[in-house]
Amino acid sequence: MKIKSINAYLKDLGNNRPYTIAFKTVSTVNNAIVEIELENGIIGRGSGNPSEYVVGENLTSTMEELNKIDFMVGRDIRQFYSILNDIQEKLPKNPAARAALDIAIHDAFTQYLDVPLVLFLGQKVKSLPTSVTIGIKNVEDTVEEAQEYYDMGFRVLKVKTGLNVEEDIARMKKIREVFKDEFLIRVDANQGYSVADLTKFYKETTVDKIELIEQPFSAKAFDDFKNLPAEIKEIIAVDESLINPNNAFVLASPPAASGIFNIKLMKSGGIYPGRQIATIAQASNTTLMWGCNDESAISISAALHAGLGFANTEYLDLDGSLDLIEDVVSGGFDIKDGWMTPTGKSGLGVTGK
């Protein structure tokens, strides 16, 4: 079954809830959308949204690469792994472009097989709750947004931090005061802390039961991570430091840099290399978190299917499509009280609108 055509276009999906993190404010959500059509009419879908600050790729370069793809047209979809390898080799500087193509190939191939992608990948976990993200805000606004999520049924918060450690601590204290133990709380400093900041934050919020602390230090500060006390390192999730399987190998090599890897398909370049990172984590007894940028439900679903294929996946941070004003697809996953579950339909389970 041959690939008949590839269509790529840019779509602004909108954002109902702009937010601030340590290094930027997000107010728009543009995604590169890929549609791969097979000879029998099957359409495999992928999407990509790079973080230029993290990987050095912007949507302009993403679309430039996607609009000159020709090496896949005419290929037999049953050359599945050969095509996936070629995607990684031919677009070395564009992980979001690779991710969009990689996801579309996974979707097309598993639709061709008439099996849900998660089952093809070897499902190990049935369902997990996702966190929902609160940007950097003052204490009062943080609590107000937490209440909104609580009323919607979510019970896992990820609170962005990293600009002012004193205010970050105050926000944790207030959330616990108001909501008691109703929420699991995760924080993401997005490279905003020094070692002293992290140590202070950890010591002063121990009583507040912070589940994990994501990327406190600069992406290249591997030694700072590796030199942390074991009790802190256990709840550290590396994100911006973890771009590819080589990073995973270095971070996992003794002394390990963290207890948790946050895999994002937009960093790794898709499901195929994301699973390579996950396999390194599995071999090194590292727990997995699967995260996202602001993305279409296409790539959010892809991350969910990939994540549930590993027994060491314990955390999902896949809220990137929940605040979109519109999307190009429906389906992909079911979500109830924050718990995410694949639909059981073939491929990604997404349907074009």
Image: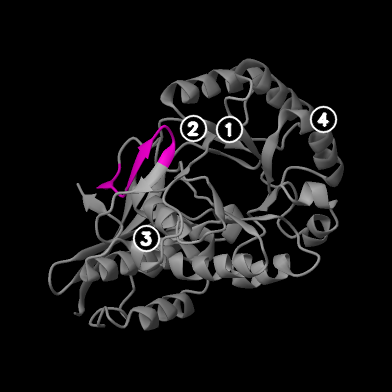
Residue 201: image quadrant is: top right
Please provide percent x and percent y for residue 208. Answer: 72, 28
Indicate left or right for 115 with 319 as reference. Answer: left
Q: CA distance from mark 2 to mark 4?
A: 29 Å
- Residue at 78% across / 58% down in the picture? 221
Please provide percent x and percent y for residue 258. Answer: 73, 56
Q: Residues within 10 Å of mark 2 (few under 14, many from 20)?
A: few
Q: Which residue is mark 3?
A: 118
Q: Is residue 329 visible?
A: no
User: SS class of the residue under badge 2?
Assistant: loop
Mark number, residue 180: none
Q: Which residue is mark 4?
A: 204
Q: Choose between 319 and 118: the one closer to the eye.
A: 118
Q: Hey, what amino acid is under mark 4?
A: Glu
Q: Hey, what amino acid is under mark 1?
A: Gly
Q: Which residue is mark 1?
A: 135
Label pair 4/3, CB-CB below 8 angstroms:
no
Q: CA distance from mark 3 to mark 2?
A: 31 Å
Label pair 2/1, CB-CB below 8 angstroms:
yes
Q: CA distance from mark 4 to mark 3?
A: 40 Å
Start and end of the magenta stretch? Answer: 327-339
- Residue at 54% across / 60% down in the picture? 267
First reached walking from the N terminus: tag 1 or tag 4 = 1
Q: CA distance from mark 2 to mark 1?
A: 8 Å
Q: Which residue is mark 2?
A: 18
Q: Is residue 124 visible?
A: yes
First reached walking from the N terminus: tag 1 or tag 3 = 3
Residue 97 drawn above or below residue 204? below
Nearer to us: label 1 or label 4: 4
Q: Residues within 10 Å of mark 1 (few under 14, many from 20)?
A: many
Nearer to us: label 2 or label 1: 1
Q: Is residue 267 magenta?
A: no
